[in-house]
Image: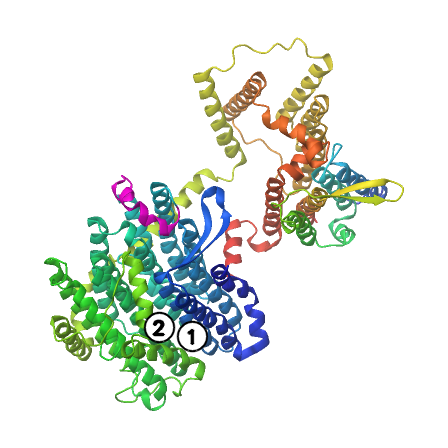
Amino acid sequence: MNSTILQTATRYLLPLLLVFSIVVMLQGHNKPGGGFIGGLIGAAGFALHGMAFGPNATRTALRADLVVVMALGLAFALVAGCLALASGQPFLTGLWVSVPFPGFGEVKVGTPLVFDIGVYFVVIGVVMTIVLSLLEENA
Amino acid sequence: MTLLLAVLSGFVLAPFAPAIHNALGRFSGWAIAVLPASLAALFLVLAARGDGAVVESHAWMPGLGADLHLRLDGLALLMATLIAGIGAAIFVYAGGYLAGHRHLGRIYAYLLMFMGSMLGVVLADNLIVLFVFWELTSVSSYLLIGFDHADAKARKSALQALLVTGLGGLAILAGALMLGSVAGDMRISHLLLHREAIREHGLYTPIVLLLVFGAFTKSAQFPFHFWLPSAMAAPTPVSAYLHSSTMVKAGIYLLARLTPALGESELWNGLLTWFGAATMVVGAWLAFRQTVMKLILAYSTVSALGTIVMLLGVGTTYAVEAAMVFLLAHAFYKGAMFMVAGAIDHETGEKDVRNLGGLSRSMPLLAAAAALAALSMSGVPPLVGFIAKELAIKAVLPDADLGREGYALAAVFVAAAALGVAVALRVGFAPFFGAKRETKREAHEPPASLLLGPGVLALLGLGAAVAPGVLATPLVEPAASAALGAQAHPHVALWHGLNLALALSAGALVLGVALFRGQWAIVGLAAPATRPLDAIGPSRLYEHALAAVLGFADAQTRVLQSGSLRRYAFITFGVIVLAVGATFMLRRPLDALPDIGDARPYEIGLVLLILIGAWFTAVARNRLAAIAGLGLVGYGIAIIFVLFGAPDLALTQVCIETLAVVLLVLVFYMLPDFRSFSTRAQKARDLLVALAGGAAMAGLVLVVADHRPDMTVSDFYAENSASQAYGRNVVNVILVDFRALDTMGEIVVLVVAAVGVYALMKLDPTTRDGATTGVEKGGEE
């Protein structure tokens, strides 16, 4: 596909979708969202990019190899689980700390968030692996 | 902690073995050998220091009754010392034998893993722990036999060993679970306390059959002996370690370990005695007619394993003592013989005994070690093999506790022993003495690394007999006591007086020398008689069974995995309709259709919209229209989720729907033209299945909605989400906290699926149309 309209729209949509996906991922603990949905939204953004500019451009835009993205996601999830082990609790027990954030007050950060970030990366990596493989097949 | 560290040390060091090898080069074998050598010393010190067994337990899976109970008693000490001690020799030997091999570091790693697994087997004091390590020995043995993985024969042999011993492993698991539940205790050392209960229980027979079956496969007893000679595809250090002195003794270890709890019944004694005796004779004969050194030794190992099993089967105090002495003697001389055979091969390039002769002038030290080992194997004094043989004959002779069958066993034993003498001379003497023969390479004395192992083991065989009090008795006596469940006093001495056993032992020796002289003539004469037997041997049976299993897998795959999407849908929905429909007929869970009077108009409108979408999809004339129809259905369902308070589900549904459309559009290009191939009748059938499937699902949903399920779980999550997990979105909290382990499994599955997709699409364009070819290709790389 070589559509100027799609390409121009994508230039504006991709950053928006990515920011939105991160917001959805981060707010997931208290509002609708989470790593899985956030990942899907992010992947949808990249898929759009892939259709507008072609798979090679998307691989460049992604900057990291998709295998690395997936491995990073699994590593995040694993680390989130192992932090509990290190503090003597069962694997994947949620641990929380309050971090003072200037201007926001206290922000609670916990291992479930780290875990969710892992899910986010895995979903993006998996969906994009499939989408880009298919796109390259067509090229 | 000590025992646990001893078991785990091999596993811990294994990943670093290649790095150690890269750093130290040709001295790497010596460096790695420090670990097993110190482990062997540790076991001896532990045993010498304490009176009684060293016991440890660590929490592992307390809920399942599987804790890491480890126990170093007499029997474990004998085995663990052999495993670690011979292991040390093997690492040095491997460093010399495979010097310069590209993957030497890797074989160190596998060997270390194996050593750890084997130590786990003999130190385990819990049936589950024992099973886990038992399986690990099978796995590491698979890796070691298939070490030369570019060779199809090595791969096949590795698979054969894995399948045979793996089958045995399953039997062990079943037997162990039954035994544990009958005794009410998974600790092996506690089984003796429940001896009577086990014996009188109805499950006693299946328990014995399963465990004995498992032990027989591991210890290569007839008719499962065939995997051991095939396993000779492994490099010689592996054969010398696993397939002569340690792994194949795991089965014997298990039998000895369970003798106090399960032994002394007609079933147990009969199985062990007669299968052991059969293995002993069959192995001896098969060894006798071989010409390749390693195969000769492999079959003679089968024979020796049979002897030990037979002695355990006889089961008298005397016989069990003899079994332990025999085990020790065999580990010494057979380990040495294997390493000698490997050294000859390494230095001359010859594997066939008929091409060897007069090597003693060029390699005198190796010849000396070989001679000592061969004499021990033949049962010549003053070597430990002689003592083992004499004790064994005494154990089966009628003047011990056996009845008339003792004569038969003694006769069979003498015959096997005579064949063993001939074989020992063939491998240990014939290559070194007599006329010198030209070999492929000019023969030289092998390097120190190749001499150390056989030399030390051969000298141990001498030392154990000359000064039994130093090593032999301290190892054998507690082992025999543990296997008997009572104090044993094995008489490890060279002189037992002039008696029938001595006469038979001498007779076997003389007969053996005669057999050695006439070996090829006898084999030639017997060939016409044995040829038809070979055609129906157990290895053929294995091949047929394997082919049958593969054929069955092939056939059912062809039926079920037809590759036709319509057929998959047909089968899936058909099964659902049948199962759900039958339940509906039998249970009649739905009294009346629910009242939909309180549905709001826009809800009804939405449902109609979804129905129209579905209808449109079914009758669409081109793909894009069909996809649009499907999209309508999907987004409609998402709106229903929103209306009924499931925003997370709705969000996910919208995302998935969007991506699904993208993916479908991408797949478009690869599909053939949109055409209809179905006949009218087929369409009618499909419609029927579709409607029935829909009705079944709708019925299920109605029933679920009608009978409010137990809400404890949902309530728990709803109540504790905010207070315990600091999250107000229950769905997300469940995903990332309460049930994070499930999510973890799911994301791993996702990654695996992505790798699969990538492999299918990218790996090799020329073989893309067949997934199987891709897999085979992957296997060969």
Q: Is residue B65 magenta?
A: no
Q: Which mark is residue B335?
A: 2
Q: Tell me: residue B641, above or below residue A44.
A: above
Is any part of residue B479 visible from this angle? yes
- Mark 1 and mark 2 in contact? Answer it, CB < 8 Å: yes
In the image, residue B517 lies at what x, y percent?
18, 80
Instruction: Name, please, the residue furthest toward the bottom.
Output: B361
Q: How is the image coloured?
A: rainbow
Protein chain holding label 1: B
Instruction: Name, please, the residue furthest toward the right.
Output: A103
Q: Which mark is residue B139?
A: none
Which residue does the numbered mark 1 point to in the structure image? B89
Q: Nearer the viewer, residue B507 or B441?
A: B507
Secondary structure of residue under mark 1:
helix
Q: Is residue B190 magenta?
A: yes
Secondary structure of residue under mark 2:
helix
Q: Which residues are magenta?
A: B186-204
Q: Tell me: residue B751, above or below residue B304.
A: above
The residue located at (15%, 74%) in the rendering is B502
Q: Nearer the viewer, residue B586 or B709?
A: B709
Protein chain holding label 2: B
Is any part of residue B527 visible from this angle? no
